[in-house]
Amino acid sequence: MAAKDIRSTSGSATRQEVRDTDLGTAPDELELASKPAEPDALFGGPRLGPVGWLRWLWRTLTSMRTALLLLLLLALAAVPGSLVPQEGRQPAQAADFRRRNPGLSSLLDKLGFFDVFASPWFAAVYLLLFISLAGCIVPRCWHYVRAVRARPPAAPRILARMPQHVRWIARDTDPSEALLTAVDVLRRRRFRVATEWGEDGWAAAEKGYLREAGNLLFHLALFGMLIALAMGSLFGTTGQKLVLEGDGFTNTRTQYDDFSPGTLADGDSLEPFGFRLKGFSATYQRTGPQRGTASSFVARLSYTEGDGGTPRDARVEVNKPLDVNGTKVFLVGHGYAPVVTVRDGKGNVAWKGPVPFLPQDGNLRSVGVVKAPDAVDTTGRPDQLGFSGFFLPTVLLTKDGGWLSTFPAPDRPVLVLTAYHGDLGLNSGIPQNVYQLNSKRATQFKDSDGTPYARALRPGDRMKLPNGAGSLSFDGIQQWASFQIARNPSNGTALWSAVVMGAGLMASLFVRRRRIWVRVRPHAGSGTGTGAEVEVEVAGLERGSSDRLAEEVEEIAAELAERFLEAPQDTSDSRPEERL
């Protein structure tokens, strides 16, 4: 055999020329749904009836544009949940925000910004996105199944119009044998192949169905992620608990400082376990520009599973929670608890123990209150005592008389307190915030010069109240740690959905969808038998543009020519009128 003529063209076809042979509605990168039809009434056409309007609304809701818009709205709707403290997860911060911004808080309350993820408008966007994705994915899946089962489309009449095209003429080759060879080459390259036998025979091959499969997989996994988030919101539980060193916690609803069950969650059927905080340690950078930055937080726990299980030790660190049968215990904060002893006017101990103070900045300047509800005065009459102030781990007195903490470790601890007595509402039966002191009906103690009575105490110091009303001694310092105990039954679903989303995205980005056609027919003017000439054409088409298609077409043409015992030769100097 000898090559008589070969031509190669690339990128010469226009969109109009390949319109009839484009990949069309094959499943690669199909829109999420057909574009929504515009209501004819807007253009002076016939009026739409109720069914027509419903059909138009459904097509609009399930269109790709609407799905993307809803996804963007959902992302924007989550922003206030990150900027504004949420009452369900950060009750103390939310209360402090309300106190510092009373005017803004009333507006944010009306908009639902203090509980964004449970607000009606967030639920509406979430539900619409859910419906939109469902309406997009189901038709696409059926379309994809039909496309996979369908045979590759027939070869176009003029292959030279394809973006990539190679043609040559071979001798001493039977057309049927040449077409059979082309089918074998394409199948070895894992193409799906359809053939048409005859004098003008052709083989149509298609490859890259995983691209659309990845696209669908990504959207199905996104759908699964939305379901997982909804299940977590409905059936999950979250609670906060502050635990002092040496104290314990049992996973029952009454033990939580703050508890937020899901809408359909049974808050009384929690995982049975408990733990005790054996100790807490924190280390900080002592020098350099990162001075004061924490390098480690470690809470040492002893926990038991079930009722009366064997105690086991565990270390809980930031982003390293304790997992007890799906319920996770996260370390979310820590601080100091000054140990104090309060004596009343009779000299009796009215309160003794550690009192948690809440941090206000990175150097753990903390505020808190001490309450003694059972104190009495010198005559024996009830006279509740209360103390409020702040704790400074490493104190610095400024020139203008201010108090600062310059380091979060307790290097030079100081407790600064002022005192009240009278009706603090501690025995009224109305629940109070343990970190706030209700002093509206109480009287603040005064110094001899009439100024508010206040003292700065170091460990071991004692402050005596005026007129023998009592005293408070600063006995030492303990640490506390705050934990978030959360159970989300959809964590596994969310994890696998994220993995599948990544796999689907990789497939949709890196798998190429393309079609290859090979036409074999007797060359015009050649005879039959020995010395017969066969015209061979190889053409390719790919959605989008890729240099790899040209290489693949040339590789297939070279392999075919090699199977015909000769390689194609470039005849670009052929007369123009001979080009197809």
Image (spheres, helix red, strand yellow):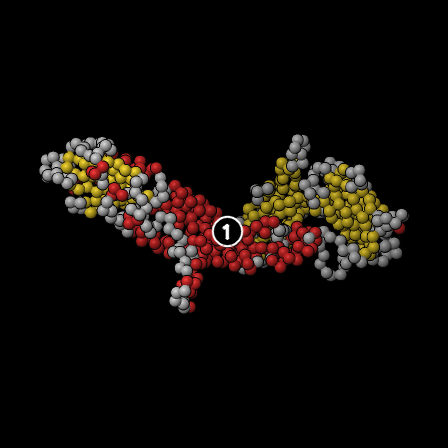
The amino acid type of the residue labelled 1 equals Leu
Q: Nearer the viewer, residue 24 or 321?
A: 24
Dot 1, crowdedness within 10 Å: few (<14), some or many (≥20)? Answer: few
Q: Residue at x 86, y 56 (%)?
A: 380
Q: Residue at x 21, y 35 (%)?
A: 575
Give the labeled residue for mark 1. Answer: 72
Quadrant of the snapshot with the C terminus: top left
- Mark 1, secondary structure of its residue: helix
Q: Is residue 399 visible?
A: yes
Q: Is residue 41 left or right of 310 when viewed as pictured?
A: left
Q: Residue at x 36, y 43 (%)?
A: 544
Residue 318 picture quarter: top right
Residue 395, how many percent across, how many down? 76, 38
Q: Is residue 437 left or right of 500 when viewed as pictured?
A: right
Q: Residue at x 67, y 41 (%)?
A: 362
Q: Nearer the viewer, residue 82 or 241?
A: 82
- Up the image or down, 188 lies above or below 56; here it is above
Q: How many marks?
A: 1
Residue 162, how many percent across, how many down? 28, 43
Residue 572 picture quarter: top left
Residue 104, how many percent across, how many down? 66, 54
Residue 48 picture quarter: bottom left
Residue 161, how many percent across, how many down? 27, 43
- Up the image or down, 213 lies above or below 268; here it is above
Q: Is residue 52 visible?
A: no
- Up the image or down, 11 lies above or below 79; here it is above
Q: Nearer the viewer, residue 488 or 58?
A: 58
Quadrant of the snapshot with the N terminus: top left
